[in-house]
Amino acid sequence: MDTSAAVDTSAVGVEPDQPALAARSLYRFFRAGDEETLALRGVSLAVAPGEILAVAGPSGSGKSTLLACLAGTDEPDGGTVLVAGQRLSHRLEAERTRLRARLIGLLFQSSNLLAHLTVAQNVQLVRRLARGPVSTRTEDLLGQLGLGRRARAYPAQLSGGELARAGLAVALANDPVVLLADEPTGELDLATERDVLALLRARARGGIAVVIASHSPAVAAAADRVLTLTDGRLAP
């Protein structure tokens, strides 16, 4: 799918014709005693602004490891990750944290909400950590996601669908260039999964690049491209 005509790359700080996210020859090793596991084997990919990329593959194929390297929460042993043209990998952890807070949104199967904060406070916390301008007020963002009346609710007071949308609000709070989602619909019913995927598509139209690691056929059907990861390698 050609997303360029519908996407304003300047809105997310990406130069024209530049990938929002690029990974070049990523390798990741894990060692336990004398045994070594190669979790990623030369993975390369590029995601354009406005594109939704699904990463499929069986459990243990390396999907979560790949997303962790793309997010800068884990360091690849080889290769490079670039976000909006800026190198994320092979930096000090504090530098990766600052770049992630400003450029990347994270959405997981388990909630990314802090239980002792309200929905609005969770969003505002992410915005403070980003330390940069954001285009939408907290109230407006929650309203766009159908949570305008739940801003003062705590996570324990939300329904499953509301929790999913609140998690997405937190992931979008810093106006990210890239949104990385690890099995975000794995525990949702079909109707809520459709709602979340529709919200992700709407955000992609605004220029955000979305990468989703998932087993779900609905996620694959909603994506612009699907890559399959097997034993740490992308299928040709």
Image: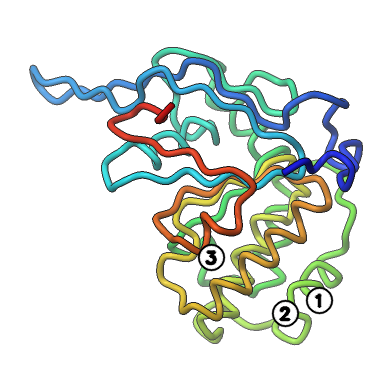
Q: Is residue 81 above or below residue 174?
A: above
Q: How far across and how far down the image is residue 217, in percent?
A: 45, 61
Helix, strand or loop status at disc 3: loop
Residue under circle 2?
A: 147
| Residue type indicated by callout 2 | Leu
Q: CA distance from mark 1 to mark 3?
A: 20 Å
Q: Quadrant of residue 57?
A: top left
Extreme residue in the left direction: 34
Disc 1 designates what residue? 143
Instruction: Choose the circle earlier in sequence order: 3 or 2.
Output: 3
In this rendered view, identify the residue nearer to me: 33 or 64: 64
Measuring from the top left, give residue 81's x and y in whole percent.
58, 22
Q: Is mark 1 in CB contact (under 8 Å) with mark 2?
A: yes
The nearer-to-camera label among 3 and 2 is 2
Q: Amino acid at mark 3?
A: Leu
Give the distance between the C-alpha atoms of the residues marked 1 and 2, in whole angstroms.
Answer: 5 Å
Q: Residues within 10 Å of mark 1 (few under 14, many from 20)?
A: some
Residue at the disc numbered 3: 114
Residue type pointed to by label 1: Gly
Please tell me whether mark 1 sits on a helix, a strand or a loop. Answer: helix
